[in-house]
Image (cartoon, helix red, strand yellow):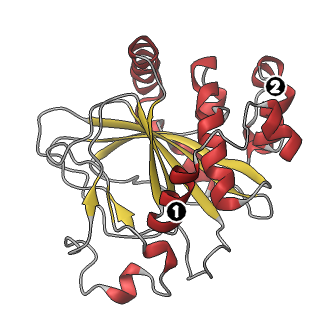
Amino acid sequence: MQNLLYQLGVREDTLSPDEKQFLDQNGYLNLGPLVSPSQIEEIRGRIDELLHVEGEEAGSELMESKNIRFPKEAGSDRLADLVNKGPVFDLFYTHPRVLAGVAHVLGQQLKLSSLNYRAAKPGMGLQRMHADWHEVVQPGDYKVCNSIWLLDDFSKANGATRLVPGTHLRSQLPQDAMGDPMQPHPDEIVIEAPAGSVFIFNSHTWHGGTTNTTTSPRRAIHSYFCRGDQPQQIDQKRYILPETLERISPSAKEVLAV
């Protein structure tokens, strides 16, 4: 896997020592702008096409993989299995800065768990404070790591993600520590950054969406990774299409574990 990451452009200095230290201590890291304005427009256009074509079935792959029946999350638009929905999405699981951040959290043995789109609709989007793992883990024994790719400017007004820095190091889950995980946490911060920015966060860090008080959806793509010994959120081998296999590189196939 170390050779794989090298093939995808990951080097020891892809993240600076200060960035690694910040990620270790706080459980998240702003990687800065990784997507150009023209790429954002192309991605948004493809998202709009998929939402139109898939209609009520949008995001169904994720529900099927979890053996969950509808209804889906209220108050948001969802798409799943973006790996199979166009080359415009290949960047989301092969970018060296993202892979370097994920490898720093999970170690060299990693794989893509799922690649999904979520947009908080106006007046909606509030989530309970949660971690993306069902139990407490020891510091360093992390199972999952996420990256959020901002397709719109993130702000407190439009329902940006909130998180509590350092909570990946605690021996508690938010539902056990907070009286009401839907309420604000006194130590939470809200991610505010321009479209095109990408945030890595250790998925054991407490986090959740906030309410979108604007008149437009707040759009993002989540490139979610797991450690190599953990099951994927979407079984990539089950869903991978022949045309995807023909398109992507051998290194990308290894990241997908196909």
Query: Which disc, if any, is residue 221?
Result: none
Q: Looking at the picture, how far across and down is residue 213, in whole percent?
A: 11, 45
**Residue nearest the observer in this picture, 23 or 86:** 23
Left/right placement of residue 194 relative to residue 130 reads: left
Q: Looking at the picture, how far across and down is residue 157, in whole percent?
A: 14, 45
Q: Total number of numbered labels?
A: 2
Looking at the figure, which quarter contains the C terminus?
top right
**Residue visible at 31% across and 53% down in the picture:** 161
Query: Which disc, if any, is residue 203?
Result: 1
Amino acid on which disc 2 is placed: Leu
Q: Looking at the picture, how far across and down is residue 244, in whole percent?
A: 75, 23
**Does residue 214 appear in the picture of this structure?**
yes
Q: Is residue 18 above or below residue 176?
A: above
**Residue nearest the observer in this picture, 187 or 157:** 187
For disc 2, the neighbor class at 10 Å (few under 14, some 14 to 19, many from 20) is some
Q: Earlier in the sequence, mark 1 or mark 2?
A: 1
**Residue nearest the observer in this picture, 76 or 251:** 251
Mark 1–mark 2 Cα distance, whole angstroms, equals: 28 Å
**Residue visible at 28% across and 76% down in the picture:** 181
Callout 1: helix, strand or loop? loop
Residue at the outermost front position: 17
Query: Which disc, if any, is residue 245?
Result: 2
**Residue visible at 73% across and 30% down in the picture:** 9
